């Protein structure tokens, strides 16, 4: 949630019937033109009805290349940001076993991850958003996402290690609890930096080594502590 690419200009949707499969395919083709290369990610984006995750009054804009409000001061992330974050999380893999998302929001990114993972755990700090996301995911027939109300800055697990961790809010510095959640060869994608200077950062774990790489500039709201 809350993510958009730090650049000017957005693509404008064409025609009518924006809730149709044809609209999703146009969005996928636009993402390909914008540099998304992972075919499994593009296919996953094409299977998820983004209009189901926004307010009905905004459904006609659901396939525009822009973030949209979902209430509580949050947004559904720009499609390019969702695609790029998941592309980085996958690397050269086409499917994952277990994924973790920090910042469920409306549930759209979790729904895309669910097309690529056997199981997805998603954490949301705002109770009402988590409840709504569960309802939408269920209505879309997506049953392999577990949404939990919790503080992502305190997320931890003594049992599970994740093949991918995708964070949908920005931290100034890397939260120390997140890299240890990765399985061997797992990847963490998170926007890092102060407002106006954020970039997508990917961390890949190999044994006890964590290799960081910086990627595109983005705009996200802060990763906050606590629950609401």
Image: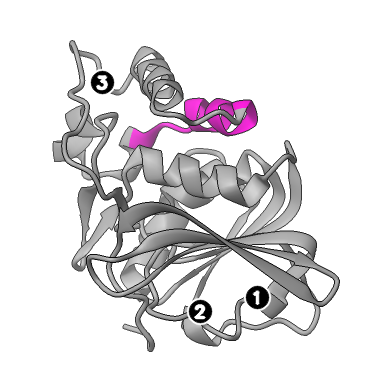
In the image, farthest residue toward the right:
207
**Is the residue marked by circle 2 packed among few (<14), some (14-19), or many (20+) residues within 10 Å?**
some
The residue sitting at 41% across, 66% down in the picture is 130
Q: Upstream in the sequence, badge 3 or badge 2?
A: 3
SS category of the residue bearing label 1: helix
Q: Which residues are magenta?
A: 39-50
- In the rendering, which numbered label is found on residue 35? none
Q: Decide if residue 4 is on the left or right side of residue 33.
A: left
**Is the residue marked by circle 3 packed among few (<14), some (14-19), or many (20+) residues within 10 Å?**
some
Q: Residue 55, image x and y in percent?
A: 21, 44
What residue does disc 1 label? 179
The residue sitting at 37% across, 74% down in the picture is 127
Residue 62 shown in magenta = no
- Determine whether label 1 and label 2 are within 8 Å by CB: yes
SS category of the residue bearing label 2: loop
Q: Upstream in the sequence, badge 1 or badge 3?
A: 3
């Amino acid at each position: 949630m809350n993510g958009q690419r730090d650049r000017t200009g957005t693509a404008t949707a064409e025609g009518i019937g924006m809730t149709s499969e044809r609209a999703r395919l146009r969005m996928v083709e636009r993402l390909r033109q914008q540099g998304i290369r992972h075919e499994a990610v593009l296919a996953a984006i094409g299977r998820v009805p983004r209009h189901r995750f926004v307010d009905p009054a905004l459904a006609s804009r659901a396939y525009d290349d822009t973030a949209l409000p979902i209430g509580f001061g949050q947004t559904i992330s720009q499609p390019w940001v969702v695609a790029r974050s998941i592309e980085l999380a996958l690397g050269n893999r086409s499917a994952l076993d277990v994924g973790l998302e920090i910042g469920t929001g409306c549930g759209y990114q979790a729904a895309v991850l669910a097309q690529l993972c056997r199981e997805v755990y998603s954490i949301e700090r705002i109770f009402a958003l988590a409840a709504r996301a569960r309802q939408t995911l269920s209505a879309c027939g997506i049953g392999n996402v577990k949404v939990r109300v919790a503080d992502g800055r305190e997320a931890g697990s003594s049992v599970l290690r994740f093949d991918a961790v995708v964070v949908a809010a920005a931290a100034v510095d890397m939260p120390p609890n997140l890299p240890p959640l990765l399985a061997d060869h797992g990847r963490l994608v998170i926007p890092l930096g102060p407002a106006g200077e954020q970039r997508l950062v990917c961390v890949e774990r190999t044994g006890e080594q964590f290799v960081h790489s910086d990627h595109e500039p983005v705009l996200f709201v802060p990763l906050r502590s606590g629950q609401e």
